[in-house]
Image (cartoon, rainbow, N blue to C red):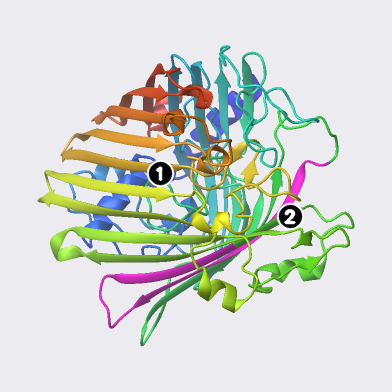
C-alpha cells in the first residue's frame, strides 16, 4: 500500500513539474459528476463530437464542451490535444469515496467497489502520458470493505460457495464477499491507446457504457469493475453526406469471483462484442444504435482466429436434438440490443429506448412470431427547465428484464445467466449489465437542481427482484405478496470547494419480503460521501 501511495505521489509531482498547463485534466468516471455534466450539456445541444452509443472514459476525452457554462472551469473535461510534439504528462485527480450501509449491501453503478454492510472506502488517482498518437493512462483504484455480517439466504446448489447467489446456479453474483473485511486493488481506468486519424485501438481495463440510459443500460454499464479488453473502432464519429457513424469492437476476458463455486480452474470466460451507431443528418436529434455481445467459457485449446469475429456469426440458432430428447442450442450466450434516442435541444428534452434480446432466436420465423420472447428493455426521458446558469432537470427511467408469457410455452433464458458459461455475464462477482440483476424490473424518477456552485438531487426508485425465479415457484395463497421489492427515497448534493468538490447522498431503502419471505421487511440506510481534488499541491 505504501509503495502504491508513493508511486501516485511521484506521478502527481512529475505532471505538475513538466506540464502545468495540463493540471486541469479530468478523467470521466462513468456515472460520476463529470459524466453527468456532459449529459446535461448534451441535452441542450451544447456538446460537439459526442458519442452516439459507445461511452468510455477514453472516448469522452474527445468531447468538446460549452465554455459558457458556469461549471466549465471547475469540471471541464475538454478535448485532448491530438498530436503533442513532445511527451506530455497529465496529472489526474484524486478521488475519495466512502459508503455506509446499515442493514444489507447496496452497491449501484459504482464500478469495482462492492459496498457491503458497514463502511466501505475507495481511492483512485494517477497520471496520463501522451506523445504523438500514443497515450498511456495509469489510474488504479483501491478499496476496502468492512463487510459486516448479515443473514444470508441458504444456497441450495451443490459445488457452490455458501456466499453464492441462491436463486440461480448459473451466475456468479455473491450475496456477500466472504466472512469479514477485505481490501482489493484494481487497475481501474488504466490502459494504453493509439489514436490514428479517425480511428483508435487500445488495451485497457476502463469501464464501458452502451447507450443513453443513465440508470440501467441492459448490455453494458459500470455496475462492475472494468475487465481487460482490446478494442478497435472509431475515435470520434465519421461524418458523411447522410450523417455520422461510429463503431467499436471489443475482445475481453471475464474472471470469476472467489465466492462462486468450489471447482478450481473454470474461472475465465471469453467475451466479444460489437457496437454500431448512426446519427442521420436528415433527422436532427435522432440517433440509432445496435450492439451485440457474446460470451463463453474460455476455449480449452486457447483462442483461435475464428473467435475474433464471433460477433459476425449467425443470429439464429435452432439447436439440435440430443439422444435423450433434449435440445442443445450452443455453448455461447448471446445478447443483442437496438438503441433509439431522440433529442430536442430547443426544448431541452430527450427520450430513449434500449430493447434487448437474450440468447438466440431459432430462426427468422421464430423471431417474427414471438419477438417478445426473452426480451428486456430500458426506456426513459430527460427534460431540463431553466437557463445556462440555473435550472432543474427531471428524468425518469423504467427497466424490465423478466420473462414474458412466452415462457408458458417454452424455456425462456434469464438475462445474464447461462448454463454453459456458468458464471454468467459478470466480472468478479458483479454484473456487467443492469445492476438490478436477472429477472429484475425498476422504475426511477429523479429531480436535479443546478446552480453555479453545485447541485442537489432527490429521487425515488422501486426495484422488484428476479421475477424469473419468483414465477417458477409453486403457487401459494396470496403469492403476489411474496415479491422481494426495494422502495428507495434518496437525496444528494455536490458543491465545488476551492480546487475540489465535495458531495454526498443519503438514501433510505425499505425492503419488502426479504428473500421472498412474506412480511419479513427491513430498512437500510445508505450514506455516500465523495471528495475530489484536482491540484497536485494537495498531495505534497
Q: Is residue 270 magenta?
A: yes
Tell me which label, 2 or 1, sits earlier in the chain. Answer: 1
Q: Which residue is mark 1?
A: 26
Q: Quadrant of residue 345?
A: bottom left
Which numbered mark, 2 or 1, is in the foreground of this view? 2
What is the crowding at mark 1: few (fewer than 14 residues within 10 Å), some, or many (at least 20)?
many
Residue 503 seen from this side: yes
Q: Nearer the viewer, residue 193 or 419?
A: 419
Chief SS of the magenta region: strand
Q: Residue at x 34, y 42 (%)?
A: 443
Q: Is residue 42 magenta?
A: no
Residue reaching furthest front?
477
Q: Nearer the viewer, residue 198 or 505?
A: 505
Q: Quadrant of residue 241?
A: bottom left
In this rendering, is residue 266 above or below 100?
below
Q: Which residue is mark 2?
A: 296
In this rendering, is residue 309 above or below 428?
below
Left/right placement of residue 317 relative to residue 84 reads right
Q: Nearer the viewer, residue 21 or 495?
A: 495
Q: Residue at x 26, y 41 (%)?
A: 445
For the residues labelled 2 and 1, the Cα–Cα distance comes to: 35 Å
- Residue 415: where, in percent of width, then height? 57, 50
Q: Nearer the viewer, residue 16 or 271?
A: 271
- Residue 90: where, in percent of width, then height? 47, 45
State the extent of the magenta-drawn residues as a range. Answer: 266-292
Q: Which element type, helix, strand or loop, lies under badge 1?
A: loop
> Residues at badges 2 and 1 in contact (C-beta under 8 Å)?
no
Q: Which element type, helix, strand or loop, lies under badge 2?
A: strand
Q: Residue at x 74, y 26 (%)?
A: 161
Residue 87 seen from this side: no
What is the crowding at mark 2: few (fewer than 14 residues within 10 Å), some, or many (at least 20)?
many
Q: Quadrant of the N terminus?
A: top right
Amino acid at each position: 500500500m505504501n509503495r502504491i501511495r508513493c508511486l501516485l505521489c511521484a506521478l502527481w509531482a512529475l505532471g505538475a513539474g513538466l506540464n502545468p498547463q495540463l493540471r486541469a485534466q479530468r478523467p470521466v468516471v462513468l456515472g460520476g459528476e463529470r459524466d453527468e455534466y456532459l449529459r446535461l450539456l448534451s441535452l441542450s445541444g451544447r456538446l460537439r463530437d459526442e458519442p452516439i452509443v459507445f461511452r468510455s472514459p477514453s472516448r469522452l476525452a474527445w468531447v468538446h464542451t460549452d465554455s459558457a457554462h458556469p461549471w466549465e472551469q471547475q469540471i471541464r473535461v475538454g478535448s485532448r490535444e491530438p498530436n503533442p510534439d513532445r511527451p506530455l504528462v497529465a496529472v489526474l485527480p484524486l478521488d475519495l469515496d466512502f459508503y455506509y450501509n446499515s442493514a444489507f449491501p447496496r452497491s449501484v453503478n459504482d464500478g469495482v467497489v462492492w459496498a457491503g454492510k458497514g463502511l466501505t472506502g475507495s481511492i483512485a488517482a494517477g497520471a496520463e502520458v501522451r506523445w504523438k498518437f500514443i497515450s498511456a493512462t495509469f489510474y488504479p483504484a483501491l478499496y476496502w470493505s468492512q463487510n459486516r455480517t448479515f443473514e444470508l439466504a441458504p444456497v441450495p446448489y451443490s459445488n457452490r460457495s455458501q456466499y453464492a447467489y441462491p436463486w440461480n446456479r448459473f451466475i456468479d453474483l455473491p450475496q456477500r464477499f466472504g466472512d469479514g473485511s477485505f481490501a482489493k486493488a484494481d487497475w481501474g481506468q488504466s490502459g494504453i491507446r493509439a489514436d490514428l486519424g479517425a480511428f483508435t485501438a487500445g488495451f485497457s481495463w476502463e469501464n464501458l457504457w452502451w447507450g443513453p440510459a443513465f440508470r440501467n443500460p441492459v448490455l453494458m454499464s459500470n455496475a462492475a469493475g472494468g475487465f481487460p479488453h482490446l478494442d478497435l473502432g472509431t475515435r470520434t464519429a465519421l461524418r458523411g453526406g447522410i450523417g455520422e457513424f461510429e463503431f467499436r469492437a471489443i475482445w475481453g476476458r471475464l474472471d470469476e469471483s472467489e465466492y462462486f463455486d468450489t471447482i478450481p480452474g473454470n474461472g475465465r470466460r471469453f467475451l466479444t462484442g460489437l457496437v454500431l451507431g448512426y446519427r442521420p443528418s436528415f433527422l436532427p436529434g435522432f440517433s440509432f444504435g445496435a450492439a451485440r455481445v457474446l460470451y463463453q467459457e474460455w476455449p480449452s485449446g486457447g483462442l483461435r482466429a475464428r473467435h475474433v469475429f464471433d460477433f459476425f456469426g449467425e443470429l439464429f440458432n435452432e439447436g439440435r436434438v440430443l439422444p435423450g430428447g433434449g435440445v442443445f442450442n450452443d455453448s455461447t450466450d448471446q445478447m443483442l440490443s437496438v438503441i433509439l434516442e431522440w433529442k430536442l435541444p430547443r426544448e431541452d428534452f430527450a427520450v430513449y429506448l434500449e430493447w434487448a434480446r437474450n440468447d438466440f432466436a431459432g430462426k427468422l420465423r421464430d423471431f417474427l412470431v414471438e419477438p417478445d420472447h426473452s426480451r428486456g428493455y430500458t426506456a426513459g426521458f430527460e427534460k431540463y427547465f431553466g437557463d445556462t446558469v440555473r435550472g432543474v432537470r427531471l428524468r425518469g427511467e423504467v427497466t424490465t428484464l423478466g420473462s414474458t408469457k412466452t415462457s408458458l410455452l417454452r424455456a425462456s433464458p434469464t438475462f445474464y445467466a447461462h448454463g454453459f458459461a456458468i458464471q454468467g455475464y459478470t466480472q468478479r462477482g458483479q454484473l456487467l449489465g443492469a445492476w438490478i440483476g436477472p429477472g429484475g424490473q425498476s422504475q426511477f424518477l429523479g429531480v436535479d437542481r443546478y446552480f453555479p456552485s453545485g447541485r442537489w438531487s432527490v429521487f425515488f426508485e422501486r426495484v422488484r427482484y428476479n421475477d424469473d425465479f419468483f414465477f417458477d415457484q409453486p403457487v401459494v395463497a396470496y403469492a403476489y405478496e411474496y415479491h422481494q421489492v426495494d422502495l428507495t427515497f434518496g437525496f444528494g448534493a455536490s458543491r465545488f470547494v476551492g480546487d475540489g468538490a465535495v458531495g454526498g447522498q443519503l438514501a433510505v431503502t425499505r425492503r419488502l419480503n426479504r428473500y421472498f419471505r412474506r412480511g419479513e421487511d427491513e430498512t437500510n440506510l445508505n450514506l455516500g460521501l465523495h471528495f475530489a481534488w484536482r491540484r497536485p499541491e494537495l498531495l505534497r
